[in-house]
Image (tube, rainbow, N blue to C red):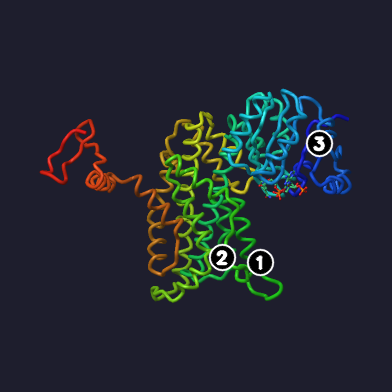
């Protein structure tokens, strides 16, 4: 039977996506550079649905019904180009190559442009949810042409996660690199969420004096409220876990150096290029990088810190409530920054991305899935041109209600010498945005002084320069 879809690249992600398609009733052609993986998949999971195992590129392509839908799930970067070089000559106009790897959106734009000349639709697609999601329903962020979504969308909708209201967690994001761009920012937001949770944990431990097991319970309680999310849920699981070998809390036997694969870093690099302040996401990336500098940390251990004053029991419980407020407020800020970056990318590349729809398809399947995303969707549904999430009335009200506690948590963190860079960056962003006047006026004055970079005045149109080296009179520039 002709396969409706093909998957090449059968490591964890590709194998599970192929099984997901098959379990949903599609006939799936499967292929992998090393044929043993293809055989293993068909042997182990053949009973789950219709698979067509193929060992050569020619057989794989021949197994697909036309227009062909070919999903590539290989290691991002050069391997993706190698696979394209191998398959593109075998394809015909109208066929689709779906890259589900974590590609950089600039690579996706290039590949899309090159393949378009051949009449092939290149569909750069963000897939989130890890192994588990790929099998049982990921959040899927396809870019590429509208026509390709017409041919692919129904299948993606079928295999994707479903939000609580039953709607599929996939939608056409926009042309060429839009899907991978949105996936990149998703990961940046994921970094920020994880960092904020990590800071909350450390504050509960080092300021409030709670044990990991007690903190697990606190997170479980939070997970029944407005912070309800996959990441809070797994945080409780990890904190409650006890190491079998030592009987110690698991979190105490793991080396405290966080690794990263790069999508968080890209989010910050691109934000710098686009001029979008994503300070919370940047702090999250830097926090991971700082944790990895063991040499620097060892060399700094003797530096002076404040005298610790642990809280009493009643104070600790009140502090935990304040941390919940600080975490929630900081979370609003990191999503505000992430959505700003998506809006800026959409403007820069003419993608016309619907921000409410992005929030909507992140409600299920992906790592940042959370009740909170329904609120973001509602905010953009109410006002598509919302300039910032902080301009939404209900978020503004909540953050306003949280701010006293947010500040109190940062005061306590500072006093006790516990780093909380994510909370602090988020609060600084909030305070900067609401400030009447920023010291940027002084910065402009300095720039004009040393470089004659000119400035604009609050009371008149035009650009001006002060003759700093002369009589300090002002001239029109
Ligand atoms: P890997 O990223 O580990 O890639 C392994 C696959 O790439 C194997 O099938 C391998 O074939 C194939 N491959 C390589 Br490496 N070089 C190749 C080449 N030159 N030509 C053809 N095939 C080549 O697999 P993964 O963890 O399943 O991830 C797949 C993609 O999905 C990646 O882009 C990843 O970033 C993305 N992603 C992963 C996750 C996750 O949670 N793991 C989540 C979301 C997205 P071989 O078997 O012959 O070596």
Instruction: Give the CA separation, mark 3 to mark 1.
Output: 45 Å
Q: Quadrant of the N terminus?
A: top right
- Callout 3 secondary element: helix
Above-or-below relation of 413 to 397: below
Q: Nearer the viewer, mark 3 or mark 1?
A: 3
In the picture of the structure, the residue carrying the numbered disc 1 is 241
Classify mark 1: residues with Cα within 10 Å, few (<14), some (14-19) or many (20+): some
Q: Quadrant of the C terminus?
A: top left
Q: Where's residue 135, x and y in %?
A: 75, 45
Report whether the residue tagged 1 is closer than 8 Å to ligand 1: no
In-front residue for pair 265/171: 265
Could you tell me if residue 382 is visible in this image?
no
Above-or-below relation of 141 to 199: above
Could you tell me if residue 429 is visible in this image?
yes
In-front residue for pair 321/17: 17
Report whether the residue tagged 3 is closer than 8 Å to ligand 1: no
Q: Where's residue 108, x and y in %?
A: 61, 36
User: What mark, if any, has residue 57 been given in the picture?
Assistant: 3
Q: Where's residue 57, x and y in %?
A: 81, 36
Disc 3 and disc 1 in contact, CB within 8 angstroms: no
In the picture of the structure, the residue carrying the numbered disc 2 is 215
């Amino acid at each position: 039977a002709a396969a409706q879809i093909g998957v090449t690249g059968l490591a964890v992600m590709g194998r599970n996506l192929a099984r997901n398609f098959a379990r949903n009733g599609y006939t799936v052609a499967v292929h992998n550079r090393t044929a043993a993986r293809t055989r293993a998949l068909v042997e182990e999971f053949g009973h789950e649905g219709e698979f067509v195992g193929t060992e050569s590129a020619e057989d794989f392509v021949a197994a697909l019904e036309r227009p062909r839908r070919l999903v590539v799930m290989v290691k991002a970067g050069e391997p993706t180009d190698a696979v394209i070089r191998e398959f593109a000559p075998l394809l015909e106009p109208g066929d689709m190559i779906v890259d589900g790897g974590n590609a950089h959106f600039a690579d996706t734009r290039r590949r899309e442009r090159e393949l378009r000349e051949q009449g092939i639709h290149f569909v750069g697609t963000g897939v989130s949810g890890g192994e588990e999601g790929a099998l049982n329903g990921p959040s899927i962020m396809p870019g590429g042409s509208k026509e390709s979504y017409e041919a692919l969308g129904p299948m993606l909708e079928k295999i994707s996660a479903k939000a609580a209201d039953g709607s599929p967690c996939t939608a056409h994001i926009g042309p060429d690199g839009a899907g991978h761009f949105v996936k990149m920012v998703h990961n940046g937001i994921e970094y920020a969420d994880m960092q904020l949770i990590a800071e909350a944990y450390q504050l509960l431990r080092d300021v409030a004096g709670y044990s990991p097991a007690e903190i697990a319970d606190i997170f479980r309680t939070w997970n029944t409220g407005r912070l309800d999310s996959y990441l809070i849920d797994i945080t409780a699981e990890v904190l409650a876990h006890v190491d079998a070998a030592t009987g110690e809390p698991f979190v105490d036997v793991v080396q405290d150096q966080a690794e990263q694969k790069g999508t968080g870093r890209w989010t910050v690099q691109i934000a710098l290029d686009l001029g979008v302040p994503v300070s919370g996401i940047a702090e999250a990336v830097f926090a991971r990088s700082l944790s990895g500098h063991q040499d620097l940390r060892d060399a700094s251990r003797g530096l002076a810190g404040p005298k610790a004053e642990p809280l009493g029991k009643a104070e600790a419980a009140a502090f935990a409530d304040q941390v919940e407020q600080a975490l929630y407020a900081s979370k609003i800020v990191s999503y505000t920054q992430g959505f700003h970056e998506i809006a800026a990318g959409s403007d820069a590349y003419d993608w016309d991305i619907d921000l409410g729809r992005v929030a909507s398809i992140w409600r299920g399947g992906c790592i940042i899935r959370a009740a909170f995303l329904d609120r973001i969707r509602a905010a953009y549904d109410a006002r598509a041109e919302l300039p910032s999430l902080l301009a939404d009335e209900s978020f503004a009200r909540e953050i306003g209600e949280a701010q006293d506690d947010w500040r109190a948590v940062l005061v306590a963190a500072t006093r006790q010498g516990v780093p909380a860079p994510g909370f602090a960056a988020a609060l600084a962003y909030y305070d900067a945005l609401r400030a009447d006047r920023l010291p940027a006026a002084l910065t402009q004055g300095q720039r004009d002084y040393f470089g004659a970079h000119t400035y604009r005045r609050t009371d008149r149109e035009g650009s001006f320069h002060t003759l700093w080296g002369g009589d300090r009179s002002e001239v029109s520039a």
